[in-house]
Every structure is written in C-alpha cells, then in structure tokens.
Amino acid sequence: MTIFLRLYSTFAFIVLIVTSSSLSSAPAAQALDVTKATIVDLTHPIDANTIYWPTETKTFQLDEVHKGVTERGFFYASYRFCSPEHGGTHVDAPFHFAERGQTTAVIPIDRLSGPAVVIDVSTKAAEDTDYTLSAQDVSDWEHAHGKIPDGAIVLLRTGWSSRWPNKRAYLGDDTPGDASNLHFPSYGPEAARLLVDRGVAVLGVDTASIDNGPSKDFLVHRIAGAANVVGLENVTNLDQLPATGAWAIVLPMKIAKGSGAPARAIAFVP
C-alpha cells in the first residue's frame, strides 16, 4: 500500500508539473490537484454493441485464443481482436481529412492533454436533432466563462451519449451500409473555424462525428484536419464535467500511419 501511495503521489506530481508548464494561460488547470480530483471516464467500452460508421463492413471482433486452466495448473486468458479505426470512443487524426495532416502516431503528446472546455447544447439539440454549434454559441460561452485557452480540449455536450448503444436512436438511422440519412447534432463550420483560431487542440463530441449527421461535405473535419486539430468522437459522461476547471487526457492507440484509433479518454474534475 505504501508503495502504491508513493507511485500515485509521483504520478500526481508529474501531472501537476506538466499542467503548470504547458498551460500558463489556464490558471484553473494549474490549480488542479489530481490527488484530490475525481476521475471521470469519458469512454464507451468496445464490444459487440459498439457503434461504427454505417459504411463499415466489419466491426469489433474478439476471438478467444485461450481461456482456462493450462496443463501446468494455472489460469490463463488471451484474446485476439480486430476493429476499424473509427468506432466507439476514438480519435480522428488530422490525416483523416487532410492529406498533409498528422497521422495518429505522430500527434504530439502534449496535444492530447489539456484543460477541458465543456459547451452544453443539449437543450437546443433536444429541439433540433441536426443542431450545429454556432459561432454565437461559442461567443456566449466565452462571455459566461472567459476566453477558451490555447491548447484546450473542447467537449461538445449534446446529450446523445444517453442513446448509446441504440444505433437507430444514436445515428438517426440504422440502415446497414447507408450513411445518407443520419441525424444527430455536432459542430458547425463557423464555430469550428472560431475554435481553431483560438488554438484548441481537440474537438470532442458525444455523437458519432464532429460534423452533424446530415453533413455530406464534412467541413468541420476538413477545417480541423487542415489545422492539425484532433477530433474525438463518441465520448460519454460529459454531464459529470463542469464547464471549466477539469483537465482532460485523450490517449489513442499509437497506430503508425493511422487515420484514427480507439482511445481512452478521461477527465480530472476538482
């Protein structure tokens, strides 16, 4: 137990150093003591119910290699898994929609950790399934909470994670192989441009895409990709985060040359 506490304290000390050195413009983040913070998991589990983009022909597959007692008398379990890059809680690397954008493995690690900015449009999304975050929404948020800091991880809360894993409710349509009739809220292009101008590191959302369901030209993806801003899709538990003051960490699988990857996303909440 003593060893565990020493290791945890060391980890906390390291996180506080990283926090203080990487974001001098975010006093609230600097003051966060992770030893006293609540850790919120922002990640859906990956399993047979995981939602993937409708055009994916293959989804999550888990094959048993061994599960049981070995010839030497001890228990041993091992599995083999296969999954598309883009499904469940995952990142979109800039390369996903930008030919010269960063691939998954080369995204700078300091771009995957930062102050969490939670913009709540759940009331508006409940009234308009295809609602898109506007530049005015961002301005209103900043009027209430202060300017969004450079390096922020922006998390758009629409309330859609409560529909997971009901594919029809979550995507607006569950026709296999067809992405032409999807309906869910997300970012709008003008809001995305404004956030990119603010220097944010990540655009995250609790729906299937940083573009809304009806989008056919994926302007938000293209705006983000061109600026090497990471996308984070299918997050959950945003109702447990404050508008400001939390610290988010997004760690994707380090897939070489990848256009995206499954990710474990968490937040430290004071």
Image (spheres, rainbow, N blue to C red):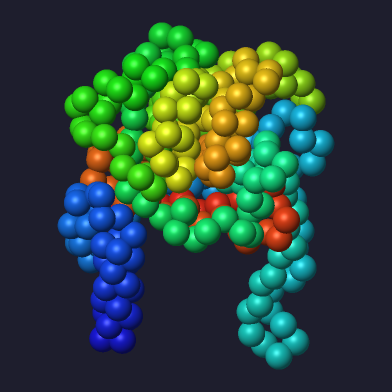
Picture quadrant of residue 220: top right
Q: Residue furthest top?
A: 127
Q: Give the image location of residue 68, x and y in percent.
A: 69, 73
- The residue sitting at the bottom extreme is 72
Q: Position of residue 54 (x, y in %)?
A: 72, 28
Residue at left 63%, top 18%? 215
Residue 128 visible within the image:
yes
Quadrant where the N terminus sits is bottom left
Q: In percent of the image, x 26 and y 55: which residue is there?
A: 24
Left or right of 203, for residue 225: right
- Against 3, residue 224 (above or below) is above
The answer to whether residue 162 is seen in the rendering is no
* Figure disc tally: 0
In this view of the protein, which residue sits in the foreground, 188 or 165?
188
Q: Residue 155 or 220: which is nearer the viewer?
A: 220
Which residue occupies the foreground of this view, 36 or 62?
36
Q: Is residue 204 found left or right of 257 in the rendered image?
A: left
Above or below, 60 against 216 in this view is below
Residue 11: give x, y in percent of width and height. Answer: 33, 73
Task: Give the left or right position of residue 216, taking residue 131 as reference.
Answer: right
Relative height, residue 57 to residue 30 (above, below): above
- Residue for point 47% across, 20% down: 190
For the point 79% across and 25% down, the residue is 177
Q: Quadrant of residue 240?
A: top left
Give how far across and how far down residue 147 sits, in percent.
Answer: 26, 35
